[in-house]
Image (spheres, helix red, strand yellow):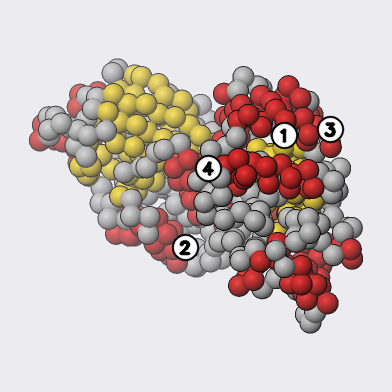
Amino acid sequence: MNPSPLDVLILADLHYTARARHACAVTNRPKPLALMFIQKALARLRDQGITPGLILLLGDLVDDGDAPGSAEDLTQLAGELLKTGIRILAVPGNHDSDPARVAQLFDSAPGLHLVSGYGFLLFADQRVGNEHYVRTAGALAEPAQAAAQHPGAPLIAVQHHPLHPAIRDPYPYMLDNNDEVLASFREARVLLSLSGHYPPGQPTHVHEGVAYNTASALTEAPFAFQHLRLEGSRFELTTHTLRIAVPGLCDVHCHTEFAYCATTVAAGVNRALAEQLGLATLCLTEHAFHLYFPREIAWTYDWQRDRGLAEAVWNGPPRRGRMAAYRHFAAAQRGPGVRIGLEVDLMAGGELLLHPDDATGWDLLVGAIHEIDTVRKGTPQAEMERLFMRDLDQLLTCPIQVLAHPFRIFARHQMAKPEHLFREVAERLARAGVAAEINFHTNQPEPAFLRACLAAGTRLALGSDAHRFEEVADFDRHLRFLREAGLEPRDLVPQLYSPA
């Protein structure tokens, strides 16, 4: 048997609670967000080009398996995970109450499961007293049996309780017959043992030839998950955290349910994620043209060519579209750590698409060039560059604080980003006091433009441009981009734009 390379997402201690009528003693667990955290973990791996072939759940899937409604929570959790189409293997935790229910929902009976040539040994250890657990004699024999029956399959043991190193705590985190378990792994030459249950986790330790790892809890800060890369008898285990590692950051560009292009963002969800994941300032920054125009007109961009469309919607009815509704809605969101703004474009005649009555009351305006009025399929690159600079100059006469996704329009029109303009654009932004946004939403920022901004003294701004909740409060790519350019994000925080 020749095992194939396999990428595994490891999740521990979800404590998911939605319908269950249960008050958790650990108040700092954002348990209702567990499903979102799982999707954010999958999105983080996708952003790095990683597609897991397996998801391992290391127990405590719900917070109290005996509470009314917990069965529905576990079923919802299983359904959402199985919808991904990724193979799931789960072991029960001490909070899950019914190991058989976990095994049935996730098709994860205790014992050996072969995946891509690897043998995953799942253990559901037996409760023998108040929080005390043991591994039964039958389960202790399984590693040796698996090794004998599948001599070419690397074995990975999966259980809820940590095994090594010892945890010195009055609470019995470890199995009562822990030494017997270690001996069974040693004799079967288990490659790797994976556990949860201990919220801080423990890094990988090798003991008697077996590697032991205890994963941190997904729903306790810093909200960690792990990526396991298996290549035969070799493995690499990487821990990721959803909580932003750099304090003091501001997201200048996060959409809401008012955006026609939004999928799963919503102001309340955005705020909850930002607070939990350590974002200092969240700016709810909505498309002005989505607020003024109905969907069928907004997406044509005809309002960039026909000023009459703007005048018609401004004079109503309904007067100024959904702008008044959004202003009231957004104002109710403003508070510590939350600012409100608009993403604004130029309309016909080169003026900002913003009615005078809507020009004030915002914490920031983010200028954008989504389209250019006279650009058509077949427009030459040189003409596109000229029109882009024309519109940029016009935008910079307006009271904007940030330029959204610079140069993205070129990629949208299958044109090369004009590197020869990077320095000139950076210098114009610096003179106007407008920050250049680092934005990865359907966009790839250019290191050369970043260097031009630094050389020109142009301020930078971080924008998620979130349309999905997976993008909210996730600056992993932004921070890696800065570090790859040789910059330390912590040193840059005072220079990054953030509304007062």
Disc 4 vs disc 3: which is toward the camera?
4
Q: Is residue 321 visible?
A: yes
Q: Is residue 457 above or below residue 97?
A: above
- Sequence-wise, which precedes: disc 4 or disc 2? 2
**Total marks in image:** 4
Judging by the rendered image, the residue that carries numbered circle 3 is: 431
Q: Which mark is residue 73?
A: 2
Q: CA distance from mark 1 to mark 3?
A: 10 Å
- Tell me which amino acid carries mark 3: Arg
User: In the rendering, at what x and y percent does residue 211 appear?
Assistant: 34, 24
Q: Nearer the viewer, residue 396 or 242?
A: 396
The alpha-carbon separation of the residues under discs 3 and 2 comes to 55 Å
Compared with residue 165, is residue 64 higher up or lower down, i.e. above or below?
below
Query: Is the residue under label 1 in contact with that under label 4 (CB below 8 Å)?
Result: no
Amino acid marked by disc 4: Met
- Residue at screen point 60% across, 40% down: 382
- Picture coordinates of residue 239 (x, y %)? 48, 31
> Marks 4 and 1, Cα distance to the nearest angstrom?
17 Å
Mark 2 lies on a secondary structure that is helix
Give me the disc on residue 415: 4
Q: 57 and 242: which one is in front?
A: 242
First reached walking from the N terminus: tag 4 or tag 3: 4
Marks 4/3: CA–CA distance: 27 Å
Left or right of 255: which side holds 146?
A: left
